[in-house]
Amino acid sequence: MTLAGGAFTIEGWYYNTGNQTNRPILATDQSLGMSAHMSDNATVVLDRYGGGYAPFYSFGANAFKTNQWQYIVINRNASLLETMWLGTFVDTSSLVTCARATSCGGGTGVSGGTQTDSQSWGNSNWVGRFYAGYWPGFITNLRITIGTAVYDSNSSTITAPSVPLTSLANTKYLMLGAAVTTDTSGTQTVTNNNTVIQSSTKPF
């Protein structure tokens, strides 16, 4: 999926059973593509393949958990204002409030947890895989929308969905967990590299 130079939203439920160092949210081995990965238990780096550009978003110490479902969102609007939100699942009776990053850097016009990301990103072609390792756990309801932003980058909080996501007009990938190689948006051809196993584990 080529994120290109405009608006996009990457969002989904992630459950980490290991540690947070170099864990991929989305990744690539393609020129100028984005690899979004946790660098530690508080920070996500958007690393451009080929180097030279790596904006980051921080949420405070121990924000990323193990053995808990968390909703992670990367959002860039039409004005290229970008931010991230993070929320932690508690139980099915509670809506999950996702808080914006507390700080960021690497872009321009940095203000708290927002900044301008002017990169025209290339193709991000890996999910759950990264040059430094693999995602240790579960991923579901991963939706990538390109050309429009699903959320308002100026919002300090958003509410995570409590039902399975649906395909929007500009959704280019939607993984609901129905099958490892199914893109519910009907856009991508997905190949399993033989390390992904179907699971019934889900947040709701």
Image (tube, rainbow, N blue to C red):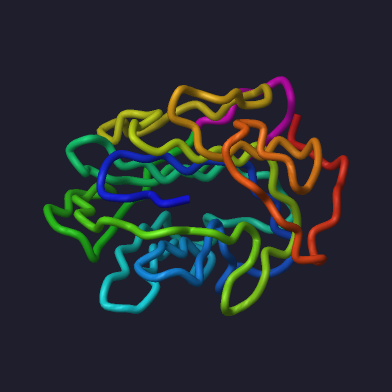
Residue 105 appears left or right of 16: left
Image quadrant occupied by the C terminus? top right
Q: Residue at x 26, y 77 (%)?
A: 52
- What secondary structure do most residues of the magenta stretch adopt? loop
Residue 154 appears left or right of 44: left
Looking at the image, residue 138 lies above or below residue 154: below
Q: Quadrant of residue 64?
A: bottom right
What x and y, as percent, mark residue 5? Answer: 26, 49
Q: Is residue 93 magenta?
A: yes
How many numbered circles are shown?
0
Residue 21 appears left or right of 60: right
Looking at the image, residue 88 lies above or below residue 124: above
What x and y, as percent, mark residue 153? Answer: 29, 35
Q: Nearer the viewer, residue 95 or 1?
A: 1
Q: Residue furthest left?
A: 109
Q: Nearer the viewer, residue 204 or 146?
A: 146
Q: Quadrant of residue 173?
A: top right
Q: Residue at x 55, y 73 (%)?
A: 22
Residue 56 appears left or right of 5: right
Q: Is residue 121 magenta?
A: no
What x and y, as percent, mark residue 99? Answer: 43, 39
Q: Residue at x 35, y 67 (%)?
A: 32
What x and y, as percent, mark residue 55? Answer: 30, 64
Q: Quadrant of residue 7?
A: top left
Q: Nearer the viewer, residue 131 or 152?
A: 131
The residues colored magenta run: 88-97
Q: Residue at x 27, y 36 (%)?
A: 77
